[in-house]
Image: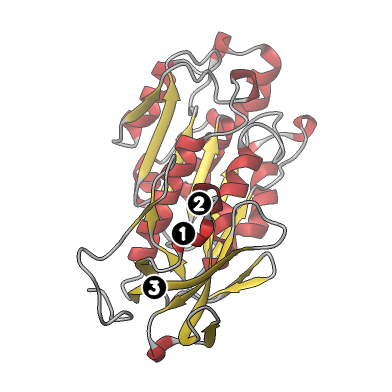
Amino acid sequence: MQKTTIFIFHGTKATPQTNWFPYLKKELELFSGHGIEVIIPEFSTPDNQSLDSWREIFSEYKEKINEHTIFIGHSIGAAFMLSVLEEIETPIAHAFIVAGFAQDLGDAVDKEYQELNLSFVKKDFSWKKIRKNSQNFTIMHSDNDPYVPLPSASFVAKSLKSSIELVPGAGHFNTESQYDSFPLLAEKVTEQIFASFASFGHLDMRAGTIRFVEPVEGSDKLLRCLVDFGPEVATMEYHDEASDKKFPVRQIVSGIRKYYPEYTELVGKTVLYVINLEPRTIMGVESQGMLMALGQDDCVFLTPEKEVTDIGRMVH
């Protein structure tokens, strides 16, 4: 199974450690145990910022691009992302454009930024090829961006035959605008990750009953669950001392601890999991499947409509 690589492209004078980039990387790396890799390339310093210099730096990552790849570009990083989409051979799954533009902003930015951005936008974009090389686009813009006027975003949206998702009062989606975190974007990218998993076409999704749960040492987000899908796909046996029963189980790590401070209440719940993803080690614990759940402010399990007596059966 191919790995899904998520690239986050920062903007002018930014770094992988600024704005909401570290937050988003940390949120998405909760899926690292299931074939997700998050990369924020660190591009050249402002003294050496140009489209060609960024292309050279990014060239070492091109082999990681495949049909499951997700691009996320902020500000001039979005313009660079569009140039990458002109050049790749394999269409990616989704491109997210945040406060992006593809034209000279003129007096909207000071002269220094204008000169640094110029080589990225003073070109003829091949919009037809860009549209061909991403299966989907999401364009997010603010109604009060002090640097990138809304018409600049509208030009990109029109060129991509897409629409703008307007976020009120978000400024330039940077630290200056109180955007050190970006839960809305995290949710949208997470939805795309699940859609990408579904597109594999061979998901083995089964109902499993949680027999044991405990926190993963060193993490405030992760829970280690032993899940009973029946003996057919079990990888270990769990002995419940309270009932003196033994259960065939798989070990699965899920980032849901904040939703369940009383995590023992999960024991006995039957929910849906994907079990044929490549096992991954998360915080030193091997995870042999992925929980199916929804929500941002809450965790909503995908559960069978009625009681399942033959847990472990494949869900079609």
3D distance between C-alphas at marks 1 and 3: 12 Å
Task: Please rate how many residues cluster around mark 3, counting C-alpha atoms within 10 Å: few if below 14, some from 14 to 19, many from 20.
Answer: many
Q: Earlier in the sequence, mark 3 or mark 2?
A: 3
In this view, the residue in front, 100 or 298, is: 298
The vertical placement of 103 against 110, above or below, is below
Residue 245 location in percent, x, y? 47, 86
Is residue 92 at all visible to an observer of this figure?
A: no
Q: Residue at x 38, y 65 (%)?
A: 269
3D distance between C-alphas at marks 3 and 2: 17 Å
Residue bearing the label numbered 1: 265
Tag 3's secondary structure? strand
Indicate left or right for 308 with 54 as reference: left
Residue bearing the label numbered 2: 260
Residue bearing the label numbered 3: 209
Q: Are marks 1 and 3 in contact (CB under 8 Å)?
A: no
Q: Nearer the viewer, mark 1 or mark 3?
A: 1
Q: Nearer the viewer, mark 1 or mark 2?
A: 1
Q: Residue at x 40, y 90 (%)?
A: 231
Residue 47's disc is none
Task: Please rate how many residues cluster around mark 2, counting C-alpha atoms within 10 Å: few if below 14, some from 14 to 19, many from 20.
Answer: some
Residue situated furthest top in the rendering: 107
3D distance between C-alphas at marks 1 and 2: 8 Å
Q: Earlier in the sequence, mark 1 or mark 3?
A: 3
Q: Are marks 1 and 2 in contact (CB under 8 Å)?
A: yes
Amino acid under label 3? Thr
